[in-house]
Amino acid sequence: MSTSTMPLADILIDILLTDYEVPENTDIHTDFETLEFDSLVLVEFAVALSRRFDVDIEDHELKEAGTIAATAELLKSKGVQA
């Protein structure tokens, strides 16, 4: 992962810690399966990210991304800058 996505990944971790009460040791390589994110949580997270960053993002894209780092890359590919 490039360093340019680190701030974006940090924002994602902050959202997850604050709104989804993930464990404190969650890092950019933590996958959604480890966090026990089911399809409903991924839908909620996709909606939250869409609103926060003003981009269209679907739950299946988050599932395919699989990790916080890959989600940051996905958002970056959609023009989001931290």
Image: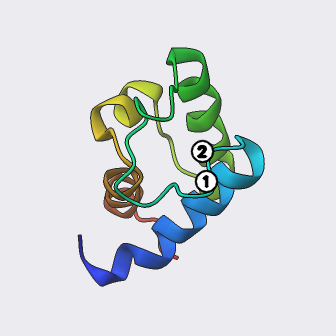
Crowd band around label 1 with a 10 angstrom C-alpha radius: few (<14), some (14–19), many (20+): few
Q: Which residue is drawn at 52% across and 76% down?
A: 82
Tell me if 13 is positioned left or right of 51 in this view. left
Q: Do the residues labelled 1 and 2 touch (CB within 8 Å)?
A: yes
Q: Which residue is drawn at 53% across and 70% down?
A: 10
Q: Residue at x 59, y 44 (%)?
A: 50
x, y (%) of residue 20? 70, 40
x, y (%) of residue 17? 68, 53
Q: Is residue 2 above or below residue 49?
A: below
Mark 2 element type: helix
Where is mark 1, residue-wise?
54
Q: In this view, does 26 lie above or below 63?
A: below
Indicate the quadrant containing the N terminus: top left, top right, bottom left or bottom right.
bottom left
x, y (%) of residue 41? 60, 25
x, y (%) of residue 80? 47, 65
Residue nearest the observer in this picture, 7 or 37: 37
Residue nearest the observer in this picture, 70 or 17: 17
The amino acid type of the residue labelled 2 equals Ser
Q: Residue at x 53, y 28 (%)?
A: 42
Residue located farthest toward the top when viewing the structure as drawn: 39
**Residue 50 — which label?**
2
Residue located farthest toward the right when viewing the structure as drawn: 18
Mark 1 element type: loop
Tell me if 60 is positioned left or right of 45 in this view. left
Residue 61: name its quadrant: top left
Q: Is residue 2 above or below residue 25?
A: below
Tell me if 53 is positioned left or right of 35 in this view. right
**Residue 22 — which label?**
none
Q: How far apart are marks 1 and 2 (CA)?
A: 5 Å
Which colour assignment does the render follow? rainbow
The amino acid type of the residue labelled 1 equals Asp
